[in-house]
Image (cartoon, helix red, strand yellow):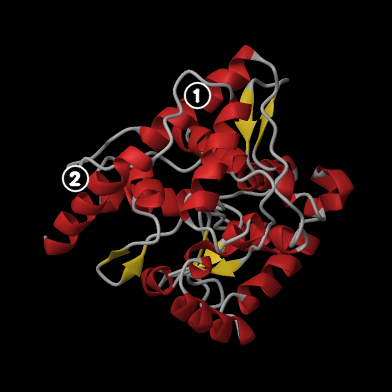
Amino acid sequence: MKSIAKLLSIISMVSLAAPCLVNASPQSDLKEFQEYFLKRFPDVKLDGFADGMYALSKERREEWLAMEEFPPYEPGLAIGKQLFEKYKIGECFKQGGIGIRQHYPYFDVVSGKIKNLEGEILECLQKKGVDLEKEKFDAVKGKTAAISAYMAYTSRGKKFNITIPDDPRALAAYERGKHHFWSKRGQLNFACADCHLRASGQLIRSNLLSAALGHGTGFPVYRKTWEAEDTSSNSALAGFGTLHRRYEGCNEQVRAKKFKAQSDEYMALELYESYMSTGVPISGPSIRE
């Protein structure tokens, strides 16, 4: 309870400094959002936010760089490449699925829906006649996350290039994600912005709160917490997870009702957060606490 009280105190102290993104265009939102973080963390360049919380702490960064010498996601990444080739996933994507992660998610004006990488991987498998349940393709972890991780790896260094089409449906989807990010929820009454904007860079228990700028650029990620949870999966894939898996965990932590992976709510949130990270380079797969 002391850690929660401390976080609430931090949030109240810095709330006045947070940007107020009300009745603004996506373009002006983006400018104000990024300027806030660049001012809050003047020693971190825009590209640096791709490293998540490890950009905000010298000590944590040293630990992370040591882990990256023999990254725990490497076995899963190798499996992801094998699965990508086995199921010929590249046939379903532009450029053979190589070097395209930076364009996801996007609003598809034909279907009127947001598309993300994991969703299109699952759609591809279904088109090829793969029984997703029988083959154990999960939307947020395991083999799906591994394929996504491999595709992200082929885009490392390429900068997020997310656009919001001039289409009322796209703008509505963007606003839905924006509303989710800024809205309080759960028994603890926290918003995404409370932890990852207003209190970013602060400690809650032993965890350093990451900045929302750059969220998504390192996903899929490996987490020790997830490895402990994934006892029934392939050991090489244990600990792998997508951004929507992290969203589910955040909802649980603030004691709010979870939405399903690939739900309209999480898709909108991913679109908003990814757009806010336009210009930040892809660094996935990566390690996160």
x, y percentage for residue 88?
Answer: 81, 55
**Upstream in the sequence, badge 2 or badge 1?**
1
In the rendered structure, which amino acid carries the disc numbered 1? Answer: Glu
x, y percentage for residue 169?
Answer: 60, 16
Query: Which quadrant, please, contains the N terminus?
Result: bottom left
Depicted 287 relative to depicted 216: above or below: below
Around disc 1, counting alpha carbons within 10 Å, would you say few (fewer than 14), some (14 to 19), or many (20 or more)?
many
Residue in the picture at 74% in, 67% down: 81
Q: Nearer the viewer, residue 167 or 213?
A: 213
Depicted 259 relative to depicted 240: above or below: above
Depicted 166 relative to depicted 37: above or below: above
Please, which residue is most extreme toward the right here?
Answer: 95
Q: Nearer the viewer, residue 184 or 27?
A: 27
Give SS at disc 2: loop
x, y percentage for residue 86?
Answer: 78, 63
Identify residue for label 2. 188
| Residue 139 makes an appearance in the image | no
Residue in the picture at 53% in, 67% down: 55
x, y percentage for residue 148?
Answer: 66, 57
Query: Whole-Å distance between the Cαs marked 2 and 1?
Result: 24 Å
Residue in the picture at 41% in, 28% down: 179
Identify residue for label 1. 175
Q: Nearer the viewer, residue 219 or 59?
A: 59
Within the image, what quadrant is residue 6 found in? bottom left
Around disc 2, counting alpha carbons within 10 Å, would you say few (fewer than 14), some (14 to 19), or many (20 or more)?
few
Q: Nearer the viewer, residue 168 or 245?
A: 168
Question: Are circles 2 and 1 on residues that touch, CB within 8 Å?
Answer: no
Please, which residue is most extreme toward the top here?
Answer: 168
In the rendered structure, which amino acid carries the disc numbered 2? Answer: Leu
Within the image, what quadrant is residue 150 found in? bottom right
- Horizontal side, residue 101 vs residue 136: left or right: right
